[in-house]
Amino acid sequence: MLQARCHKIRLRQFPDGESLVRVDTADAVDAVVVRSLDNPDAKLVPTLLAADALRRAGVRNITLVAPYLPYMRQDKVFATGQPISQRVIGDILGRYFDRVVTVEAHLHRIRELAEVVPSRLKSQSLSAAPAIANWLRARDAECIIVGPDRESRPWVEAIAKASGYDYIVGDKKRRGDRAVSVELGDVPNHRRALIVDDIASSGVTLAAAARALRARGVRTIEAVVVHAIFAPGALSIIRGAGIRKLFSCDTIAHRTNAISVAPIIAEALR
Ligand code: R5P
């Protein structure tokens, strides 16, 4: 798509667990590091080391493409004594990279990624809504689109408008990592529902939304998420709640990947 040269960053681990990276820049002036940052605590350090290695090798513009950007959900002090992790991680990435490009970062309390990633060039979170809407249109299976919480409204609405389907949004309450309830209003005349969410981690949000749909008489429930984190046990929780089919964007490699975000990333880099 971009006709760019591609080099692998070599990575090795010392016996004590520290990482060592080695880059081959071939005298490039611009470089794009592509690294999805699921499993973040293991991947962040080598990613920062790669940026430093590129800079020292003479690269002037270094962009990080992290299709999944972690720590964005920890966006306020939820309980006394906690950090605002979103700011910490955004700040570090903004110091080492000239620009960060990601997909559907969890930015519920701020308008744009640049507010937490103070990079030299403007960092961007790209919407996955057009890619999901295209996939839905091609699939051509009549359904109602369901967002599990109020925060999801703007992009659920964008997907619904672009694909031509109706949508509803639930009222979600989280009482703990794995304790979530979702309340839904009427589900007008629909037998098939598609839950859409930005992230599936423990799976309890999708499961709670599916239970609420079943209580409203919906028989066929499917789900699509952008970031397929799926922590251990998540898939059985999701299936156990009656979700028949599960799809995801390919921001994190997973067997549910059905929607490619490569075109929207390539377009942003062009
Ligand atoms: C929360 O606001 C997000 O949009 C997701 O609904 C949430 O992160 C999903 O996490 P889990 O699968 O653990 O419920």
Image: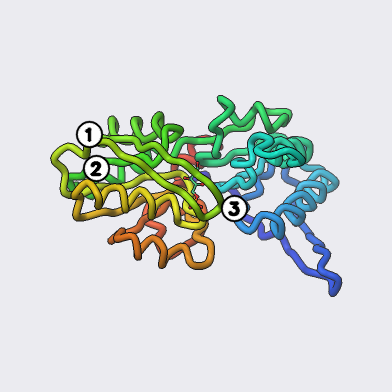
Asked whether the beta carbons under mark 2 and mark 1 sit within 8 Å of each other, the answer is yes
Q: Earlier in the sequence, mark 1 or mark 3?
A: 3
Residue at the image point whose x is 48% and y is 48% from the top:
199
Q: Is residue 164 above or below residue 45?
A: above
What element does badge 3 sit on? loop
Q: Amino acid at mark 1?
A: Gly
| Cβ atoms under marks 2 and 3 closer than 8 Å | no
Position of 35 compared to 233: left or right? right
Residue 110 placement: quadrant: top right
Q: Secondary structure beneath disc 1?
A: loop
Q: Residue at x 76, y 52 (%)?
A: 50
Color style of the picture: rainbow
Residue holding disc 1: 164
Q: Earlier in the sequence, mark 2 or mark 3?
A: 3
**In the figure, residue 60 lies in which quadrant?**
top right
Q: Dot 2, crowdedness within 10 Å: few (<14), some or many (≥20)?
A: some
Q: CA distance from mark 1 to mark 3?
A: 31 Å
Instruction: Name the residue: 77% across, 42% down.
Output: 59
Pointer 2 residue: 137
Q: CA distance from mark 2 to mark 3?
A: 27 Å
